[in-house]
């Protein structure tokens, strides 16, 4: 679906990925679940674009529900995959620390795992080769994405600021729909390695000039990033 000029989302409020459609090509932000590849193809067709227009995938972190079709694009279409150096091993299938799941409601939790199952999420396609990025990098991709280090959810969690579409993509630095409770609104994301550090990292969004805050899970949020940190802390 198109959110704004040059800005598209695939998936839904359970798991989402995004497309930045610039004249020179497309940047994909996160890759959802493996089954989202069909959603990607359908969205590209609606945009009168093709897989060959994709110039890169930027992962906000290395968790399985963000890796989705990234390796397929890399191996079948030569699309480079970018991830923070601190999450490179995780994106390649390295060990992930066990974290507390936190609050749950049966209906929402079952819905999340059922959706993941339908979208092929029970089998993770790790990325064999990645291009490592760091805080402050401006990537050589359509829209000139800017990397903002957001450690906490994982060591290499990042936000991706793309001024071209007036948006900052935050991955799991926060959520606007808790996948295990169904609760809506700005709040901390579940499955977070270091919750306290994740809350501290939100202050890095205060100076970002954008009109969209786009999480990996939940409704796209149209508003200033300056208000995000306090809203999430109030919900914590």
Image (cartoon, grey):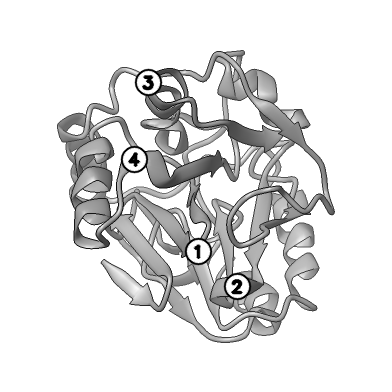
Residue position for label 3: 76
Specify few, some or many for label 2: CA neighbours under 10 Å numbering under 14, 14-19, or 20 or more. some
Q: Nearer the viewer, mark 2 or mark 1?
A: 1
Q: Earlier in the sequence, mark 2 or mark 3?
A: 3
Contact (CB < 8 A) between labels 2 and 1? Answer: yes
Q: Earlier in the sequence, mark 4 or mark 3?
A: 4
Contact (CB < 8 A) between labels 2 and 3? Answer: no
Residue at the (68%, 49%) spot, across then down: 158
Identify the residue at the far front of this view: 24
**What x and y, as percent, mark residue 179?**
35, 51
Contact (CB < 8 A) between labels 2 and 4? Answer: no
Q: CA distance from mark 1 to mark 4?
A: 14 Å
Residue position for label 2: 164
Q: Report helix, strand or loop for mark 1.
A: strand
Decide: is 141 above or below 120: below
Residue position for label 1: 22
Q: Earlier in the sequence, mark 1 or mark 4?
A: 1
Q: Earlier in the sequence, mark 2 or mark 4?
A: 4
**What x and y, as percent, mark residue 210?**
63, 80
Decide: is 218 above or below 150: below
Residue 51's label in the rendered image is 4
Specify few, some or many for label 3: CA neighbours under 10 Å numbering under 14, 14-19, or 20 or more. few
**What x and y, as percent, mark residue 74?**
47, 24
Specify few, some or many for label 1: CA neighbours under 10 Å numbering under 14, 14-19, or 20 or more. some
Q: CA distance from mark 3 to mark 1?
A: 22 Å
In the drawing, does residue 214 fall left or right of residue 53?
A: right
């Amino acid at each position: 679906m198109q959110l704004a000029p040059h800005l598209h989302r695939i998936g839904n409020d359970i798991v989402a990925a995004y497309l930045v459609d610039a004249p020179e090509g497309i940047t994909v932000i996160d890759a959802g679940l493996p089954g989202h590849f069909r959603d990607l193809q359908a969205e590209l067709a609606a945009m009168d674009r093709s897989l060959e227009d994709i110039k890169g995938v930027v992962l906000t972190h290395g968790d399985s529900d963000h890796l989705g079709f990234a390796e397929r694009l890399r191996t079948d279409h030569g699309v480079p995959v970018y991830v923070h150096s601190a999450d490179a091993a995780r994106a390649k299938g390295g060990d992930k620390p066990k974290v507390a799941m936190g609050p749950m409601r049966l209906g929402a939790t079952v819905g999340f795992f059922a959706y993941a199952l339908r979208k092929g999420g029970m089998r993770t396609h790790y990325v064999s080769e990645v291009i490592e990025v760091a805080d402050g990098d401006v990537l050589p991709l359509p829209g000139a994405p800017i990397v903002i280090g957001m450690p906490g959810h994982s060591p290499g969690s990042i936000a991706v600021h793309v001024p071209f579409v007036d948006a900052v993509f935050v991955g799991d630095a926060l959520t606007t729909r808790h996948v295990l409770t169904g609760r809506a609104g700005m709040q901390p994301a579940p499955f977070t390695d270091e919750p306290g550090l994740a809350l501290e990292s939100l202050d890095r969004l205060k100076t970002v000039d954008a009109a969209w805050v786009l999480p990996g899970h939940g409704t796209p949020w149209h508003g200033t990033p300056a208000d995000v940190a306090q809203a999430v802390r109030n919900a914590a």
